[in-house]
Image (cartoon, rainbow, N blue to C red):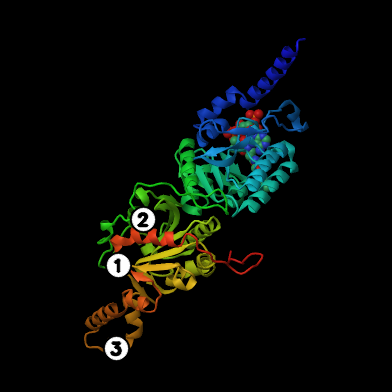
Amino acid sequence: MENQEIIDKKIEKLRELKAKAKIGGGQKRIEDQHSKNKLTARERIDLLLDRDSFRELDMLAHHHSSDFGLDKNVFLGDGVVTGYGYMNGQKVFVFSQDFTVLGGSLAAEHGRKICKIMDMALKNGCPVIGLNDSGGARVQEGVISLGAYADIFLRNTLCSGVIPQISLIMGPCAGGAVYSPAITDFIIMVKKTSYMFVTGPKVVKTVTHEDLTSDQLGGAEVHASKSGVAHFTAENDLEAIEITRKLMSFLPPNNLDEVPLIKTDDPSDRLCDKLTYLIPANPNLPYDMKDIITELADGGDFLEVHKDYAQNIIVGFIRLGGRSIGVVANQPAVLAGVLDIDSSKKAGRFVRFCDAFNIPLLVLEDVPGFMPGAHQEWGGIITNGAKLLYAFCEATVPKITVITRKAYGGAYDVMNSKHIRGDLNYAWPTAELAVMGSKGAVEIIFKKEIENSNEPEKREAELINEFNEKFANPYIAASYGYIDDVIEPKSTRKILIEAFNLLENKVDTNPKRKHGNIPL
Ligand code: HXC
């Protein structure tokens, strides 16, 4: 045989093997996948990454098991597509489970492939994006599958706070398998086609007698609104991928790199006239804090995280002068913006993410205090509220607060006050920094005087007026330097951009220790 012919045959064999790997579980199963309104593992990667940038690794890996007929079911790639590529021009590592191969189930090789790219991502300071679509531990490979999951959990934990980790849930995700996404930074679930639970509806029915569908028990909407497990929901695979690309555009590749700076046409000295009359004169009336966020942001662009969960606090990403900024804002339009268990957990986790990845924080504050009541106390508002306090206290990224209206009670301290290392704290003229609202305050300190008055209601109203005049303003706090400046609402964007520029090389540290003990 001619040399050329020998080499051609070898190349032909390679091409055949790769073509076989690419077809996964076969055409019929690909059609089944499409019929469920799901894309295949490879189609998802193609849409996720910049055009033609994906480089696959371990395409020819396969399991070496023969138990329960597995020797007749060998698939190249072993049910997961792994590799690296570029997203918005930034290097990322990706794994995408292939449901067409043994239901995307995870066992030794499948797990080893995921661990390989995680190890490479950690060494090279690149994010990991996981596209999950799997029946869970491959039953035929038994405890080896469980071990493979644990290998991934360990890496998720070691990568935490070093490289961003994003999980897209695009199919089943059950049993202990849910804990890998849970350790990652953000979870994006696809409505109707994905679910996450520790035990499925059948076990739930046996144990608790609750009769629920998979969607009711652990669908995207449930996890986005009730449990807070999901940070984003998407109508379909494509939308989940678009959310991921947008989210990633705000993030640095690792904890040592700078946040991305994206050129913007939005002038940094743009005045926000819309903000001047946004706060209602009556402090009991709500307004939508999102109007302020979008007015301040470059191009009005705000990527809200956890949109449907604990809506009394808002968290998400904007850019100011091109720089990524994490926003934490009380929402007076929901429960008057009160801090409760869920909102404290939501915001605390977000603050810690931003701090881990050098993303400066902007706090927009209008908070009447912590939510009272037995439900909150028994649920641990003390421990959970402390999470947010702890998160702000330990954060060393640039931290700026703007108090738009109420900053009452302990919540004043918690929401990035100067005392816990807020770098620059501003207040609008409508701000009220006090131990509590004027009505409550007057009822406590003038109780006797009101009771003894001939016209108690009139006297109470007078005292409330007096109290408001004296205390419901930002000027006492300003006189102590507890806020750095009282600013006009329309100048807020300009002032914030200047302030974040000022703080861009900020250095602050915490004492050396193994790790702190956040009240979990
Ligand atoms: C091996 C599996 C599998 C698994 C699915 N398949 N899950 N093979 N191990 N875990 C196979 C099926 O046998 C089937 O193969 C093919 O994948 C497609 O599955 P279908 O059942 O036909 O698909 P569908 O009707 O869409 O149902 C999907 C499913 C169901 C809901 C995921 O397959 C299912 O309930 N699977 C078992 C889920 C499970 O209990 N996993 C273990 C969870 S505990 P054929 O060849 O017949 O088409 C766990 C622990 C993790 O994961 C612990 C970590 C610490």
Residue pointed to by mark 1: 284
Q: Nearer the viewer, residue 276 or 456?
A: 276
Distance from mark 3 CB to nearest ligand 1 atom below 8 Å: no
Residue 209 in percent (x, y) is at 57, 50
User: Disc 1 vs disc 2: which is toward the camera?
Assistant: 2
Mark 1 vs mark 2: which is more N-terminal? 1
Q: Are marks 1 and 2 in contact (CB under 8 Å)?
A: no
Residue 263 in percent (x, y) is at 41, 46
Q: Residues within 10 Å of mark 2 (few under 14, many from 20)?
A: many
Mark 1 vs mark 3: which is more N-terminal? 1
**Element under label 1?**
loop
Give the total number of marks visible in the rendering.
3
| Quadrant into which the C terminus falls | bottom right
Quick check: 47 above or below 295? above
Q: Which mark is residue 449?
A: 3
Q: What amino acid does circle 2 point to?
A: Ile
Can I make out residue 331 in this image? no
Q: Which mark is residue 293?
A: 2
Q: What amino acid does circle 3 point to?
A: Glu
Residue 388 in percent (x, y) is at 50, 65
Mark 3 vs mark 2: which is more N-terminal? 2
